[in-house]
């Protein structure tokens, strides 16, 4: 199943992630599990940059699903440019979308993925309303 990244989304963050030799698998390309790690790095770095890092004992973001569409192989060495987007804020959640491309091949999307990010209270084990300051960022 392929998820479609919407055209209507808001760019919120960019970062560069080095591809290491040890990230490759026996097939000679970056292992598929690392694509999810690259998506996570971009998402968590963005959340941290806005003052909303994951908070295991309190309130904050958790993801409730994740996906990745693979289009082209990534091979080390090199860097990945991850572009992070948001869309569709709801009462308790919003969507995150991330594109991955090699920095030496600008504009060529090698993979794209995303996750539904839910605002969560670890003490009650329940979703809670997005704080107004988060909603202002993701709207």
Image (cartoon, rainbow, N blue to C red):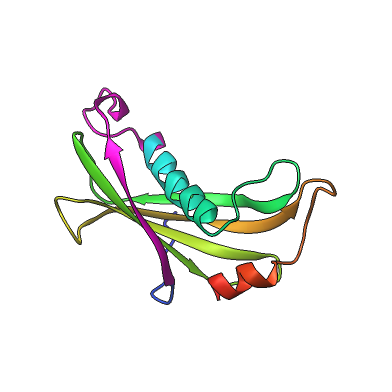
In-front residue for pair 73/105: 105
Q: Position of residue 124 (x, y in %)?
A: 85, 49
Q: Is residue 32 magenta?
A: yes
Q: Is residue 85 magenta?
A: no
Q: How many marks?
A: 0
Report the side of 119 relative to 108 (left or right).
right
Report the side of 1 relative to 74 (left or right).
right
Q: Quadrant of residue 89?
A: bottom right
Q: Is residue 88 visible?
A: no
Q: Is residue 110 visible?
A: yes
Residue appearing at x 83%, y 46% in the figure = 123
Q: Position of residue 59 (x, y in %)?
A: 73, 52
Quadrant showing the C terminus: bottom right
Q: Residue furthest left?
A: 104
122, above or below 119, in the image: above
21, above or below 131, in the image: above
Report the side of 28 relative to 16 (left or right).
left
Q: Residue furthest right?
A: 124
Q: Which residues are magenta?
A: 10-33
Q: Quadrant of residue 4?
A: bottom left
Residue appearing at x 55%, y 71% in the figure = 137
Quadrant showing the N terminus: bottom left
Q: Position of residue 47 (x, y in %)?
A: 53, 54
Q: Position of residue 120 (x, y in %)?
A: 73, 54
In-front residue for pair 59/95: 59
Residue appearing at x 75%, y 42% in the figure = 57
In-front residue for pair 48/94: 48
Report the side of 61 relative to 59 (left or right).
left
Residue appearing at x 41%, y 50% in the figure = 68
């Amino acid at each position: 199943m392929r998820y479609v990244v919407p055209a209507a989304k808001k760019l919120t963050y960019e970062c560069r992630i080095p591809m290491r030799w040890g990230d490759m698998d026996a097939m000679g390309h970056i292992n598929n599990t690392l694509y999810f790690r690259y998506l996570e790095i971009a998402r968590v770095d963005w959340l941290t940059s806005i003052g909303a890092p994951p908070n295991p004992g309190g309130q904050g973001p958790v993801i409730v699903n994740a996906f990745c569409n693979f289009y082209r192989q990534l091979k080390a060495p090199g860097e990945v440019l991850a572009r992070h987007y948001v869309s569709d804020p709801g009462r308790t959640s919003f969507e995150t979308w991330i594109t991955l491309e090699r920095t030496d091949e600008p504009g060529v999307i090698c993979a794209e993925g995303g996750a539904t990010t839910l605002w969560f209270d670890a003490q009650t084990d329940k979703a809670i309303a997005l704080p107004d300051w988060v909603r202002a960022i993701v709207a």
